[in-house]
Amino acid sequence: MILLRILLFILGIAIVARTLLSALRTIVLPRGERDQIAAFVFLSLRRLYDIGLRFAATYEQRDRVMASYGPIGLLLLLPVWLILVASGYVLLYLATGIESVYDSIVISGSSLLTLGLFKGNSLVHSILEFSEATIGLILLALLIAYLPSMYSAFQQRELQVTLLEVRAGSPPSAVEMVIRFHRLHSLDQLHELWESWETWFAQIEESHTSLAAIVFFRSPQPDHSWVTASGAVLDTASLIRSVVDVPPDPQADLCIRAGYLALRRIAGYFRVSFNPTARFPDDPISIAREEFDQACEELSAAGVPLKPDRDQAWRDFAGWRVNYDWVLVSLCQITMAPYAPWSSDRSLLRRA
């Protein structure tokens, strides 16, 4: 009997400690560290949503369904943590002299929710009750404090995504973005744009791994997405560096590097496998040479000055694109991003 109580006490402590570690990793730790409990909640909820998505005939219907996925998953974390803590304390009460499982459940629930309706009959039980109530309040306070940080990061992300529509259209297109800047005679004045998006990529790398639920928060506009916006900017910079005949700007290179590093680290958080040393042509990209040539024809028809060696331009473009091609398409699939050329359209077959 004593051995059983020792085992129950150890198991109860382990459950409570593991739950607190989950909350610490998810809310407090300023580092993208994947937590199994949070991952289980979001994956289980996604399976339920996938069942509902079978009855959605259009993307607009799927988007309306998925709009609540991120917020509901986030809010579910608190009751899951509270249930786990309560379960751990049930074992602790049983291990310290409460004979009835029912009484242990009632005391644990009353203490965790600070109701004070039921009390134990010893100093040990009083200590457990106070500690459980404290943990319950801490978890609630942490989640409340977590939400403003998340929505602040969300607003910063969406500002750039919304502004991109003016420059790249909707859905965002790299070809359209180059053409619009050409019409404004600004192809050689993109330095500030690359700087702002380099900063944006650094911000989402930090926020979308330390506040991972924000990855699934959808844009206010159904045709906007942080993933397709990333792809449009990276493809635009890649086209400017490889195809368009303008003076080279090293800031475009930095923007591309910041972008693919951010997407890789976010994808890595969600266990998306990719080759960090990918090189073209050994590693193919999802864009065919025919699509690239068609894009060049559109640019030429709009009067954009292009480099004469099309083969070299293709190799240069593919050499940039291979760094982010796979993770971009994978994140489009994970987030069920709206249609956009050269990004989410590559994942439509996988999503069907």
Image: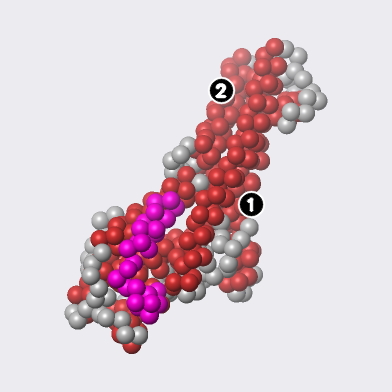
> Measured along the vertical axis of the image, is residue 250 above or below residue 109?
below
Query: What residue is shown with label 2?
Result: 10
Left or right: 130 in relation to 188: right
Position of residue 188 in the picture relative to residue 113 (left or right): left
Query: Residue 132 sits in which quadrant?
Result: top right
Please, what is the three-letter code of the amino acid marked with disc 2? Ile
What type of secondary structure mainly makes up the magenta span?
helix
Q: Does the segment drawn in magenta span residue 185? A: yes
Does residue 201 appear to the left or right of 105 in the view shown? Answer: left
State how far apart marks 2 and 1 are (Cα).
Answer: 33 Å
> Is there CB contact under 8 Å for labels 2 and 1?
no
Label 1 sits on residue? 72
In the picture as drawn, the residue positioned furthest to the right comes out as 117
Part of the protein shown in magenta:
177-204
Could you tell me residue 340's position as x and y percent?
A: 46, 72
Q: Secondary structure at mark 1?
A: helix
Whole-percent x and y of residue 126?
70, 16
Q: Residue at x 73, y 31 (%)?
A: 113
Residue 125 is covered by the magenta coloring: no
